[in-house]
Image (cartoon, helix red, strand yellow):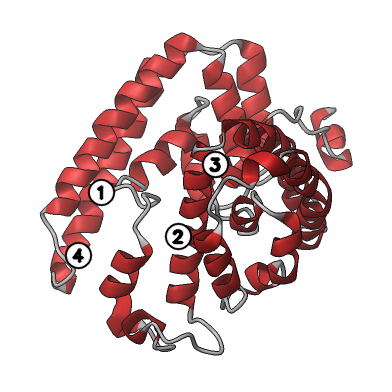
Amino acid sequence: MITSIEILGTEELLLERNPRAAAVHQGILETGRAAVIAVNERYDDTAGESALERLDTELDAILKRSLDQYARDAKGLFKADDLELWTAKITRVSGSYVGRAAAVGVPGALLLLEGIEEAEANDPYAFVSLDDTLANGAEYCPCGYASSRAVPDRLCRLCSGAVLNEWKAEEDRLLAGSPKVDADLQRVFDEVLDELAEAHLSPSGTAAALSVRRRAGEGAITRVNEARADEIALLDLARWRELSELNRLSQVEVVRAHGKYWSRWGLGSARLTTLAQESTPELQARMRLVAGRRPAPKPSLFERLFSRK
């Protein structure tokens, strides 16, 4: 089954090996994103319904203008084989959203559409400290941890996300001061990302991905921590351990599922747990890469019969 993830990955691959088309794509993407940010800045959350309708109209006009320009400027820049591969894949994905990109007729259209639509004045994935996140979200916190710091029986979703992000940031800080451990773990996670991508793209999906993470923790990460025990012993892991214990109370089930293993796995557990969430940008990027390398699908029986007429 082909999904939009595979189309995005295929487009990234085709643009990577086509510098002329990539330059055209990047220029239009940057212009479109800047236009979206400028329009969004003129509106606020208190805008009335009519104002929001005008916002939608303006945003759609930016998308149309960008796609039209890309269709003109990138037409003829792709080899016939590349265009055939893209067409064979994108025409198998149903829905008006992908259909809008397919109608452009040039690889890179879906990436352009997504990149411009997702434009934000601020990076949505930028790290925000635990203190700042809890202070900003205290009024929306039902578990009480954000305002009181009293540890509840179960963290709410807001606090769960904040604690996980802080744990990952603390682990990154520790690894920055331990380059050998960091290098060893980077090699492990490069392989784990490939396995996780394949798992999420498979019919078994989340169940297969959970198995991959468990094997990585029980095997590769543990071996790195054992091999680098002398170097790790020089690090102050108190804060890292404190946050790992808090994550055992996470609202997110897949994060809680790893809780009993962290003390055994050691450093690298925070990153592995972060990858437990399929929406992680790092994993999404690897899924696109893996899926994008797949060859064009073979024609179905119906398509073969139809093509003979």
* Pointer 3 or 1: first along the chain: 1
| Circle 1: element type | helix
**Mark 4 Cα-neighbour bin, 10 Å: few <14, some 14–19, many ≥20:** some
**Could you tell me if the residues under marks 3 and 1 are in contact, i.e. CB atoms within 8 Å?**
no
Mark 2: amino acid: Glu
Q: Is residue 247 above or below residue 273?
A: below
Give the alpha-carbon distance from disc 1 to disc 2, as whole Å: 35 Å
Given residues 266 and 58, the one toward you in this image is 266
* Pointer 4 or 2: first along the chain: 4
**Could you tell me if the residues under marks 2 and 3 are in contact, i.e. CB atoms within 8 Å?**
no
In the image, which is nearer the foreground, mark 3 or mark 4?
3
Q: Looking at the image, which residue is at 37% across and 65% down?
A: 130
The residue wearing badge 3 is: 175
Identify the disc placed on residue 52. Answer: 4
| Circle 4: element type | helix
Mark 3: amino acid: Leu
Identify the disc placed on residue 59. Answer: 1
* Pointer 1 or 4: first along the chain: 4
Q: Is residue 191 above or below residue 142?
A: above
Give the alpha-carbon distance from disc 2 to disc 3, as whole Å: 14 Å
27 horizontally vs 287: left or right: left
**Could you tell me if the residues under marks 1 and 4 are in contact, i.e. CB atoms within 8 Å?**
no
